[in-house]
Image (cartoon, helix red, strand yellow):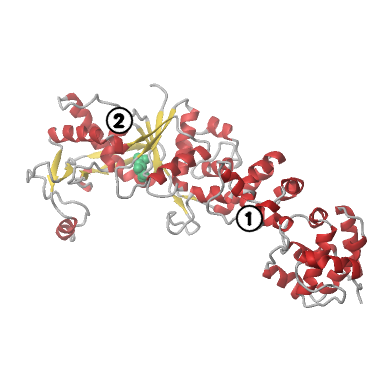
Amino acid sequence: MGPPRVRLAPSPTGYFHVGTARTALFNWLFARRHGGIFLLRIEDTDTERNREEWVDGIISALAWLGMAPDEGPSRQSERMERYGVALDALWEAGLLYGCDCTREQVVERTKDRPTPGYDGHCRTRRLPREGNALRFRVPSEGETVVHDIVRGVVTFRHDAMEDFVVARSNGEPLFVLANCVDDRDMQITHVIRGEELLPSAPKGILIWRALDAAAEGEAGWGEATALPAWAHLPTLVNEQRKKLSKRRDPVAVESYRDQGYLPEAMRNYLALLGWSPPAGEEKVPVATMIETFALEDVNHSPAFFDIKKMAHMNGEYIRDLPIDEFVDRARPWLEPAAEAAAGRWAPQSMPLPPWRPERYDGAVFRRMAPLVQERVTTMGEIPAMVDFLFLDTPAMDEQSWEKAVRRDDGAVALLRSAIDAYSSCRWDAGSLREATVAVGEAAGRKLAKAQAPIRVAVTGRTVGPPLFESLEELGRERVVGRLQASLDRAGESVAAAPAGGQAGGAVGGAVGGNPGPE
Ligand code: GLU
């Protein structure tokens, strides 16, 4: 046998689902492991539900995840004629029959039966092919066995299978037919896909064998071909162990990309959904995944798509980046407009950074970057970590204010002493720390308790990069101005301070005329 050929066969009906990404990954890993070919096939026969933008989404999501296909994309919509030839062959072999039953009629006739599905009403009616739906004559006896690498031997008894539809009354082929014809024509050796498609595997096998038989007759069909091997991958479930749903769960890969998940981290996390590397470690370089991936090791129990775990892993990957790469890769979130203007990718669904773009200073971010890198789990969290550096007046997070200033009786006095100390101390992180320790001691506080109101006053939040490096970067004037503005906000009027809450406006008065603590 030659190298394996595998495929991803998505229908372009929505955002790129994490489940599809996991399926793509397992196909891709399998192909890479065995020197095979990974194809992309767009199953777009359902013209009402398909949209071109979803096709673009599939292609760009795969490229982003580093799994661009080796062949394709091919499109089913361009192969309609071929499905017509297959239908001809099956019809001529007597394996199909026309059916004009409506769904309602079938439901009415079968409502008291133990087995659901079509009741074979039109089997012997000899309706013409034109204008009728076409059903496949499932043998009434025997069974079709799916030898599945993940799920083992799965047997489907024919008496429990209905005569399924392979073409609509307008002649349009159904998924199960087009899918089978394509897998044959594209010489697919392994069908690796989601578990929800397992029930359609016996139908595919029946069609496949029927086409083989037709090949031996004179129906104008191609040659008999070996059946592919099957591997149905475990369903992805949410925290409540329910199947992931488009409506309920955040499943769009595009949105994770926008939030600032790194593709290598996401790929690593997705690999763990049904598979684990032999050594049991979780963070695995892609080369190791490729070396060790085996479908035989895929587990069949449902896999929990744990966003918290994925975020944690993403944070680890972010911290592993060389600092210059971190800075470089942060750009779409820090300067989205400039990136988009330069024709590069920028997140679509994230709020813009709160500062005016011309106020952003890459050199400032570069200096702070090592401290930021330690503290984010997604790239999308970066702007909120550094916005206080690029805004005249940082937006005040009300909860932080409430907690660190309003409900802390000593906060106002502490901010006043900080203004005093910072007005004259040396301006570097070490000296600022010493000055703050002293301010804290005088107020009977440990450093952490002394820092909290200062941090909120200066940055607008209780969390952020380390305080003293942030103060050093902001500079004396802005820091003292913001502390002053916070005193104003707290309802304190400091005699010599000019009116107006604007941080910049308060600076002169605060530095020059501060009367000091009473
Ligand atoms: N087009 C099918 C789907 O989107 C997948 C078919 C397959 O992988 O065999 O569910």
For this view, does 447 lie left or right of residue 106?
right
Asked which secondary structure carries label 2, the reply is helix
**Closer to the camera in the image, 213 or 505:** 505
Instruction: Tell me the quarter of the image containing the C terminus.
Output: bottom right
Q: Residue at x 37, y 29 (%)?
A: 189
Q: Is any part of residue 449 visible from this angle? A: no
For the residue carrying disc 1, how many other residues have a C-alpha within 10 Å: few (<14), some (14-19), or many (20+)? many
Q: For residue 410, what is the image quadrant? A: bottom right
Gap between marks 1 and 2 measured at Cα = 51 Å
Label ID, residue 353: 1
Per the image, label 1 sits on a secondary structure element best described as loop
Reading the image, the residue beneath label 2 is 184
Viewer-side residue, 467 vs 148: 467
- Location of residue 184 in the rendering, given as x and y in whole percent from the top left corner: 30, 30
Q: Is residue 192 above or below residue 355?
A: above
Identify residue type, mark 2: Arg
From where the camera sits, is residue 404 visible?
yes
Outermost residue, left side: 125
Q: Assess mark 2: CB under 8 A from ligand 1?
A: no
Residue under the image location 23 percent in, 34 percent down: 81
Q: Is residue 453 above or below residue 138?
A: below
Amino acid type for the residue under numbered disc 1: Pro
- Asked whether, in this view, residue 414 is left or right of residue 107, the answer is right
Task: In the rendered view, tell whether residue 415 sits above or below residue 258.
Answer: below
Q: Nearer the viewer, residue 154 or 518?
A: 518
| 362 displayed left or right of 144 | right
CB under 8 Å between callouts 1 and 2?
no
| Ligand 1 lies in quarter | top left
- Residue 487 x/y as whole percent: 80, 72
In percent of width and height, residue 507 lies at: 83, 65
Which image quarter is the N terminus in?
Answer: top left
